[in-house]
Amino acid sequence: MFFPIGDDNVKGRYTPIVTYLLIAVNCYIFWQQLQFTPEQLSRFFYSYGSIPAMIWKAENLHTLFTSMFLHSGWMHIIGNMLFLAIFADNIEATIGNFKFLLFYLAGGVFAALVHCFVLSGSTIPCIGASGAISATLGAYLVMFPSSRVRVLFFIFAFRVSAFIFLGLYIIEQVMAGVESLKLQAADSSGVGYWAHIGGFAYGFVRGWFFRRNIPKSAFSRRFQ
């Protein structure tokens, strides 16, 4: 299994306030979830997760927003927050705090809508920040394709370009998403592949508009 553990940072003194805030909010809500009984947690997910069958009846539309702050377990939130911490800061530093917040939230809503469209008959809640984070990954691929991502494979660490790492990520998501539809088990794995794909597509398109904000000689090399 490959895990990203760092990347090249945009030069300059900046603090990714929104990225830190999003991580804090997600972690706080997850901590609150830990206080629930299994029955309470199930009701919580069905109340605030995006249920495709209800979204297409124009019911509980607020869950398109609330669902991106819920997580099903430790690995779910750790993985999402790791990707957010590594890839979001460069984008926030480039386009600004407020614009990044709007981009992130819009990406999460769009990702949830794509998931609900593909699985329109599903009554299983879609939860997690993965769609919004995938939007960040899509934008990162366009904006910083030559940035180096430090990857951990078991005990070995090495660097690959963002183009390769994120390219492989979206190829894997598309293949898994298509295969899940062929098996007619699109949501049985618990992974919202189509939310990932939708979010990534949104970020990829938006990334082209953000490219003009990238400073020349953008990177400082964190890992030497």
Image (cartoon, helix red, strand yellow):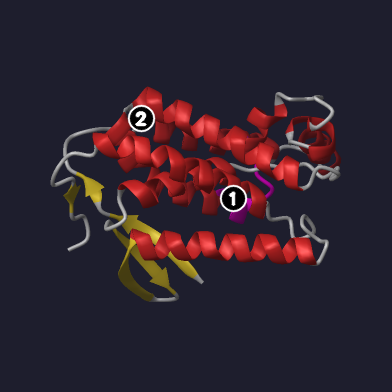
Q: Is residue 175 left or right of residue 97?
A: right
| Residue 9 in the image, given as x and y percentages of width and height | 24, 48
Image: 169 above or below 74? below
Magenta highlight on residue 73: yes
Circle number at residue 196: 1
The residue range painted magenta reads 69-77
Q: Residue at x 70, y 44 (%)?
A: 115
Q: Residue at x 45, y 41 (%)?
A: 205
Badge 2 element: helix
| Residue 51 in the image, given as x and y percentages of width and height | 79, 37
Q: Amino acid at mark 2?
A: Ile
The residue closer to the viewer here, 105 or 30, is: 105
* Residue 187: quadrant of the picture: bottom right
**Residue 51 visible in the picture:** yes
Quadrant containing the C terminus in the rendered view: bottom left
**Residue 70 visible in the picture:** no
